[in-house]
Image (spheres, rainbow, N blue to C red):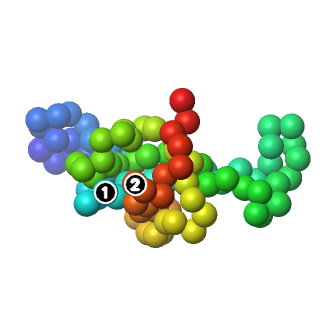
Amino acid sequence: MGRKGYNGRIGYVTPEATREKMIKPLNSNLLIQLKKEEKTKSGIILAEEKRFDEALVVAVAPEVKAIKKGDTIFLKDYSTDEIEIEGKKLCFVKEENVLAIKK
């Protein structure tokens, strides 16, 4: 007892692990972290309207079967609801607004 971050049952708990467990999406929602590309790999700066909304899935509602935590997905424009947790920007998106899963 008294050791910061120690949980006797599962060992040391990182802040990232506790953050992910704090939020559980409901219905057909996903919790994601957006990865907007400003440039292509070759260095060409993309215009705002040419950027794809690519995101990493952080948490998945129980009703969602096709998408798993850790998947990279592509989204429709303006389909997210943004939140901030401990200084980190995350978004909720409905499963029907996911266009594709990156393999």
Asked if one can make out residue 21 in the rendered structure from this viewpoint, the answer is no
Whether residue 103 sits left or right of residue 42 in the image: it is left
Figure quadrant of residue 102: top right
Residue lying at 26% horizontally and 45% vertically, measured from the top left: 5
Picture layout, residue 10 above or below residue 3: above
Give the amino acid type for the residue marked by disc 1 in the picture.
Answer: Ser
In the image, which disc is placed on residue 8? none
Q: CA distance from mark 2 to mark 1?
A: 6 Å
Name the quadrant of the C terminus.
Answer: top right
Residue on which disc 2 sits: 95
Residue on which disc 1 sits: 28
Name the quadrant of the N terminus.
Answer: top left
Are the residues tagged 2 and 1 within 8 Å (C-beta)?
A: yes
Towards the viewer: 5 or 52: 52
Give the amino acid type for the residue marked by disc 2 in the picture.
Answer: Glu
Place of residue 80 in the rendered image (x, y in percent of width and height, measured from the top left): 49, 66
Figure quadrant of residue 69: top left
* 2 or 1: tag closer to the N-terminus: 1
